[in-house]
Image: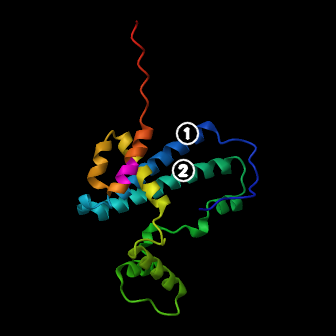
Amino acid sequence: MWCLYGAAMEETQMPEPLRRAVNYLVSEVVLNCQEVLRYTEPDIARDWKRMTMIRATDASDTMDMASMLIAAYCQRTGMAMDTLASYLQIRQQRSRRVGPRDADRHEVAGMLGTPLPPEGDRDAQMRFSMGQGYAEGGLMAEPDEQQLFTQACLHGLRARLCDDVEALDSYLPPHVATLARKIAGVLEIPQPAAEPAPA
């Protein structure tokens, strides 16, 4: 996980309307991410190709909206364009319009166990190896607790918001469902304590 150190401290807080907008958009992203995970489950396999791509791109577009709102505010308050471009990391941006790249195809080849890419192409080899890592049970040698917790948090949150906690057991692996149920339970709005009956 990346952390930023040494950044200049801002003297002013994010304006409240912008903060509310960003919080709303991030909440939408979280729900879309949960849907991506939901459509990877076997019980709704008929629609996984369409729905995983739609929800993943919805999440991406919504985060772009949040970034652009913040960028527009920063521009309005005088941030230099080169600083803005740096913060938006525009060099790593790529359009979905062009479709999958060779790097993406090499990674899928690694997942599916197809022939290795040419020896001299280090990037292709690296992406192929990443694909192999997913095929062999994940990129980590040990079970990734952060990944498990993230899945459980997303599923538990969605189940609580939709008041459908019981459905978790019907589509999640038992260890994920158990943790998601616990998280949903923590998120339950506590009911006011009943007043004691008069003596």
Lower sequence index among marks 1 and 2: 1
Q: Label 1's element? A: helix
- Which residue is farthest top? 199
- Which part of the image, by quadrant, shows the N terminus? bottom right
Residue annotated with mark 1: 20
Instruction: Please give the name of the residue rendered at 67% of the width and 50% of the height, measured from the top-left corner.
Output: 74
Where is residue 39 shown, x and y percent of the image?
A: 32, 58
**Horizontally, is 146 left or right of 135 in the view?**
right
Q: Does residue 59 appear anywhere in the picture?
A: no
| Kind of residue at disc 1 | Arg
Q: CA distance from mark 1 to mark 2?
A: 11 Å
Circle 2: residue type: Ala
Magenta: main secondary structure equals: helix
Residue nearest the observer in this picture, 110 or 145: 145
x and y percent of residue 19 in the render?
59, 41
Q: Which residue is mark 2?
A: 66
Residue 133 visible in rendering: yes
Neighbours of disc 2 within 10 Å: few (<14), some (14-19), many (20+): some
Q: Are marks 1 and 2 in contact (CB under 8 Å)?
A: no
In the visual, does 40 lie left or right of 3? left
Q: Nearer the viewer, residue 108 or 70?
A: 108
Q: Which residues are magenta?
A: 176-180
